[in-house]
DNA sequence: ATTGAAAGAGTCTCAGT
DNA sequence: ACTGAGACTCTTTCAAT
């Protein structure tokens, strides 16, 4: 699936430099990596065409905005064939920001972001209980996020 | 903590427009929101000063790069006072991209991103077993990510 | 493939409202 | 607080290597 991407050291260096902060200019990044700004541009264009670079995103501090309650919900389904139907219903709940189909302790695993505990309670007691096909759920509340980072791409290639 | 942020409808509209794709220009975004490009600029500058907007990030498709094995690890500690020491050791494992201190089924909850199952096996069997203070772990492997999105900011304010 | 420079587009500032 | 225009910086293209 990954096909022949043929990325070299410079490509990975560009990804590493921009993945957490894309504010540096091509000219400055070129200086840092000992190539011209034009080369940085060509490489990024190539990676966009390959689909490796999808674009840029705003980096928002949701905590400051008041969204500081994070919880994980492990979901047991009555039958695993109910996955698609339950997933569609979970997607309608805006506080659920991520959903994975999993193997191990749970059939599905969701991440929830809320403004406060009462909103979380609402999601768990009101929204989730409405959904048919869920046998039971385990709630894991995050008291603190120790760290969150991107996978370090090409540890070996550099 | 969140203090008086005093963000209005326009600020939230800007966040919503830029959080998933920050490539639109201030002039074009201004047209869409019926204000001038200069106003968009002032608002974003204000939100950067407030710390709400941290900057921009490259949006990378890690799956295309070959990082397509995602797993979650629930960790039981021997004593919860070991949290800081265990967290410091987990941070040294590059495949662990996120760690939360949790209440509920587990003491800690980690997310792992690997290139393949054998790399995951290495993290679980070799790296994790070395760490003192971990009683046992549950591994939840993601077979498929149904969706992943940002929290919808200010559902009520808009 | 990379470079350096020119053209085009975007950001940033500011005087006026 | 918003606007529009000018100054400035960055991106993008391209001929030359």
Image (spheres, coloured by chain):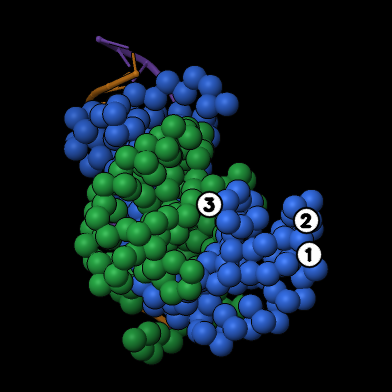
Chain colours: A blue, B green, C orange, D purple
Whether B119 is drawn above or below A104: the answer is: above
Quadrant hosting residue B153: bottom right
Residue A157: x and y, percent? Answer: 30, 27
For the point 34% across and 86% down, the residue is B1
Mark 2 highlights which residue? A79
Classify the position of the N terminus of chain A by image quarter. top right
Q: Mark 2 and mark 3, same subunit?
A: no
- Chain for disc number 2: A
Whether A109 is drawn above or below B93: the answer is: below
Q: Nearer the viewer, residue A50 or D4?
A: A50
Kindly state the secondary structure of the residue where label 1 is placed: loop
Kindly state the secondary structure of the residue where label 3 is placed: strand
Q: CA distance from mark 3 to mark 1?
A: 20 Å
- Chain for disc number 1: A
Q: CA distance from mark 2 to mark 1?
A: 7 Å
Kindly state the secondary structure of the residue where label 2 is placed: loop
Tag on residue B55? none
Q: Mark 3 and mark 1, same subunit?
A: no
The mark that comes first in sequence, 2 or 1, is 2
Query: Horizontally, is A118 left or right of A15 in the view?
Result: right
Mark 1 highlights which residue? A133
- Chain for disc number 3: B
Mark 3 highlights which residue? B140
Q: Residues within 10 Å of mark 1 (few under 14, many from 20)?
A: some
């Amino acid at each position: 699936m990954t096909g022949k991407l043929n990325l070299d050291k410079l490509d990975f260096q560009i990804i590493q430099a921009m993945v957490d902060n894309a504010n540096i200019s091509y000219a400055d990044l070129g200086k840092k990596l000992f190539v011209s700004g034009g080369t940085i541009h060509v490489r990024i264009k190539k990676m966009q065409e390959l689909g490796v670079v999808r674009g840029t995103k705003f980096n928002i501090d949701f905590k400051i905005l008041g969204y500081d309650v994070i919880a994980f919900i492990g979901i047991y389904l009555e039958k695993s064939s109910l996955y698609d139907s339950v997933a569609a219903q979970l997607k309608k709940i805006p506080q659920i920001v991520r959903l994975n189909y999993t193997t191990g302790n749970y059939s599905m695993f969701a991440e929830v972001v809320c403004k406060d505990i009462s909103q979380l309670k609402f999601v768990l007691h009101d929204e989730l209980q409405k959904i048919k096909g869920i046998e039971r759920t385990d709630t894991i509340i995050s008291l603190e996020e120790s760290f969150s980072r991107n996978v370090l791409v090409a540890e070996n290639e550099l």
